[in-house]
Image (tube, helix red, strand yellow):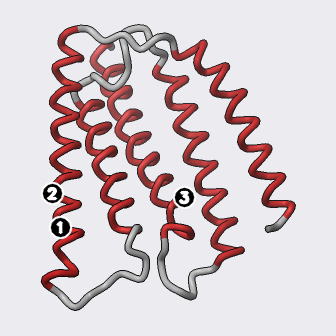
Amino acid sequence: MDFVFLGFMAAMIISGLVVGKLAGKKLGKAEFDERQQLARGKAYKAGFYTLLVGLLVVYLIPIFTEWQPKDTALLPFAVICVGVTVFACVAVANDAYLGIRQNPRAMLLVIGIVVVGNLTAGFSVMESVGSADGLTVENSMNFIIAAMGLIILAALAIRLRMAARDEE
């Protein structure tokens, strides 16, 4: 393995821990009121059913078609990420993603750092592993997580923008 990559990943882990510790203080404790708890329940339900239907489709495709993915773990992993993204977006839409005392700007920063870190790691892995064998979990996992983070980040930013407009 490349020592530059290992050094970079160690630096990312250390900076992630430092930012997580600082953001943990600024994010505040996640406390949800009754309305938010009900909305989060609906979001869990939407995410769960998305996951359930997605995994059913993923596992039925090879049965009814001749197609077999090169990496059998890639599609289930992507479906899991889609389920989590659906939960997050539904929770954001219902103003139930962040707790009462949580700082939304700090959450945007943390999600942004996760996205940048995954994009950086994804490009680094693509250089070392390559994509000659097609998409695999190994060479696309970071990009899937980055896409998930970007979607959640966009939903949260739009929701915060709408809330700021409503206050004006």
Picture coordinates of residue 108 (x, y %)?
Answer: 51, 31
- In the picture, the disc for residue 57 is 1
Q: Amino acid at mark 2?
A: Val
Camera-side mark, 2 or 3: 2
| Viewer-closest of 64 and 5 | 64
How far apart in space, not on screen, are marks 2 and 1 (Cα)? 6 Å
Label 3 SS: helix
Q: Amino acid under label 3?
A: Asn
State the residue at coordinates (17%, 81%).
63
> Residue drawn at (19%, 50%), measured in percent from left and top?
50
Judging by the rendered image, the residue that carries numbered circle 3 is: 142
Rendering quarter of residue 36: top left
Q: Which residue matches tag 2? A: 53
Question: Dot 2 surroundings within 10 Å: few (below 14), some, or many (20 or more)?
Answer: few
In the rendering, at what x and y percent does residue 166 appear? 27, 18
Q: Quadrant of the N terminus?
A: bottom right
Element type at mark 1: helix
Earlier in the chain: of badge 1 and badge 3, it is: 1
Whether the residues at callouts 2 and 1 have beta carbons within 8 Å, the answer is yes
Residue type for callout 1: Val
- Dot 2 or dot 3, earlier in sequence: 2
